[in-house]
């Protein structure tokens, strides 16, 4: 079975990348063929080093035809059975590929956004969300758009954690005589997140946390694990808040064993989504917050809220934040090692119960297998059909503008008109009235001298492939 995974991202690395990497490697381990469609760069290089095939694209309109040609070449060699896409530009590309090659299409939605799902849900075979809360959010949106018939397509596949990689340094037990972090010890708190504008809510809550610990707990040191466009701004703000009296160390982006060490050597972790899960897998107390909302200290009273929201993926940012929440949570978890020990053990149990990566990936590829079993696909496309589809993707719109009383300018807008020719048939009262032969001009200016009901049929030709497509305009009434 061959899976194509299109994924678009702005940040070079992050939780989305880890989700795709986890899927790809598990598929390979189960003898699936996997190809990831992504931008060139660090993630592409990482995938290729791990033996995952990659097709690169910049996800622009201009690059779509060439990308489809690359997919066509791949499909001829290794038939693609299923496309599992991620949102935004990658979803748009995936729709084109699924349409032209008639391949089943799955979509994973990671956060609180609709991505205009009501406009294409009929083209999606299955929608995965990373939490029940995000699933409910999408279904409420679709219900308002009268899409009740699509509820059966939605399933929850949460982010999983590699518990062989992220694990507690030592097994914690209640009577551990070597347990460190007694009340007077220096504690290390870590913020683990990308430091970009879309994470501003997380950054703002960190400022509140830093202000609280600077004033009330001089034995607290902070580590900021992450990179992003807001890093330098954060450094200035940290100096303003702490007046240089609290140690705040920006350690940069970490991966693999280095990231595990950051979690393991922290006493308390503030983190969103996947980072929160990884910290819990390392047996740490976690204050969960995401780009959309604040969940708080994961304890016996709110762990379900964390699971439901993907640990901060839902909410209304500061509008939904209750002042003093992060300060209260910090006070609870800082005041004694017993609190941290119990919360760390709860973290481990949560991961074991709900977020084991292998169990989650096995469920995911179960959907792959079942869909392939019951839906046979024919993905061989005649060359002329491919060329016609690519030509259609080059068209943006048809524009009609009035320049005088009965004079109009008609324009066929394309991503690129290089190598194309355009012809125009003008019909009056449904009879051919005027024919303008092919030329390289994508604009026609025409003056109507007789009253009547007109429409245009315009043709676009690519001579080098002998491909022609045509479209009809709306009717135009001339008095």
Image (cartoon, helix red, strand yellow):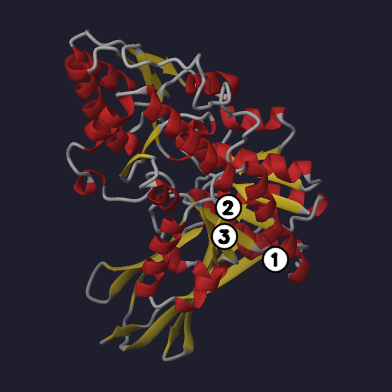
| Name of the residue lying farthest toward the front | 175
**Residue depth check, mark 2 versus mark 3: number of the one nearer the observer:** 2
What's the CA distance linking mark 2 and mark 3? 9 Å
**Residue depth check, mark 2 versus mark 1: number of the one nearer the observer:** 2
Q: Position of residue 227 (x, y in %)?
A: 41, 23
85 and 390: which one is in front? 85
Residue at 58 percent across and 25 percent down: it is 171
**Residue depth check, mark 1 versus mark 3: number of the one nearer the observer:** 3
Taking 47 as reference, is 155 above or below it?
below
Q: Is residue 366 left or right of residue 417?
A: right
Name the residue beneath numbered marker 1. 385
Q: Position of residue 172 (x, y in %)?
A: 53, 26
Name the residue beneath numbered marker 2. 85
Q: Position of residue 56 (x, y in %)?
A: 62, 39
Which label belongs to residue 95?
3
What's the CA distance linking mark 1 and mark 3? 17 Å
247 and 296: which one is in front? 296
- Badge 3 local density, few (<14 within 10 Å), some, or many (20+)? many
**Quadrant of image for the N terminus:** bottom right
């Amino acid at each position: 079975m061959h899976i194509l995974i299109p994924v678009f991202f702005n940040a070079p690395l992050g939780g989305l990348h880890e989700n795709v990497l986890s899927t790809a490697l598990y598929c390979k381990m189960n003898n699936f063929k996997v190809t990831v469609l992504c931008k060139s760069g660090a993630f592409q290089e990482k995938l290729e080093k791990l033996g995952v095939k990659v097709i690169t694209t910049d996800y622009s309109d201009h690059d779509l035809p060439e990308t489809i040609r690359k997919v066509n070449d791949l499909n001829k060699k290794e038939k693609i059975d299923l496309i599992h896409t991620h949102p935004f530009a990658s979803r748009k590309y995936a729709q084109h590929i699924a349409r032209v090659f008639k391949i089943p299409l799955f979509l994973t939605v990671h956060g609180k956004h609709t991505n205009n799902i009501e406009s294409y849900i009929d083209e999606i075979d299955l929608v995965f969300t990373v939490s029940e809360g995000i699933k409910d959010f999408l279904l409420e949106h679709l219900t308002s758009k009268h899409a009740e018939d699509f509820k059966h397509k939605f399933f929850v596949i949460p982010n999983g954690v590699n518990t062989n990689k992220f694990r507690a340094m030592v097994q914690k037990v209640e009577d551990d005589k070597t347990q460190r972090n007694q009340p007077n010890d220096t504690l290390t708190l870590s913020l683990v997140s990308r430091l970009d504008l879309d994470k501003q809510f997380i950054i703002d809550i960190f400022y509140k946390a830093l202000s609280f610990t600077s004033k009330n707990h001089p034995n607290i040191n902070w580590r900021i694990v992450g990179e992003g466009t807001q890093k330098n701004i954060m450094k200035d703000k940290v100096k303003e808040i702490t007046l240089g009296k609290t140690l705040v160390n920006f350690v940069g982006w970490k991966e693999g064993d280095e990231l595990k060490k950051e979690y393991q050597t922290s006493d308390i972790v503030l983190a969103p989504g996947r980072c929160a899960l990884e910290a819990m897998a390392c047996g740490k107390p976690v204050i969960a917050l995401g780009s959309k909302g604040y969940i708080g200290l994961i304890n016996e009273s709110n762990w379900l809220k964390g699971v439901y929201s993907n640990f901060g993926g839902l909410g209304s940012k500061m509008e939904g934040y209750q002042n003093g929440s992060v300060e209260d949570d910090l006070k609870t978890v800082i005041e004694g090692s017993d609190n941290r020990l119990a919360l760390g053990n709860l973290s481990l149990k949560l991961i074991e119960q709900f977020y084991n990566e292998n169990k989650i990936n096995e469920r995911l590829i179960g959907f792959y297998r079942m869909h392939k079993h019951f839906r046979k696909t024919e993905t061989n496309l005649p060359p002329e059909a491919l060329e016609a589809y690519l030509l259609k993707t080059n068209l943006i719109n048809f524009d009609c503008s009035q320049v005088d009383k009965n004079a109009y300018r008609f324009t066929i807008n394309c991503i690129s008109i290089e190598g194309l020719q355009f012809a125009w048939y003008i019909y009056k009262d449904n009879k051919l009235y005027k024919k303008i032969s092919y030329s390289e001009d994508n604009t026609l200016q025409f003056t109507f001298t007789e009253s009547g009901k007109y429409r245009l049929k315009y043709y676009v030709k690519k001579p080098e492939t002998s491909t022609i497509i045509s479209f009809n305009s709306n009717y135009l009434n001339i008095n």
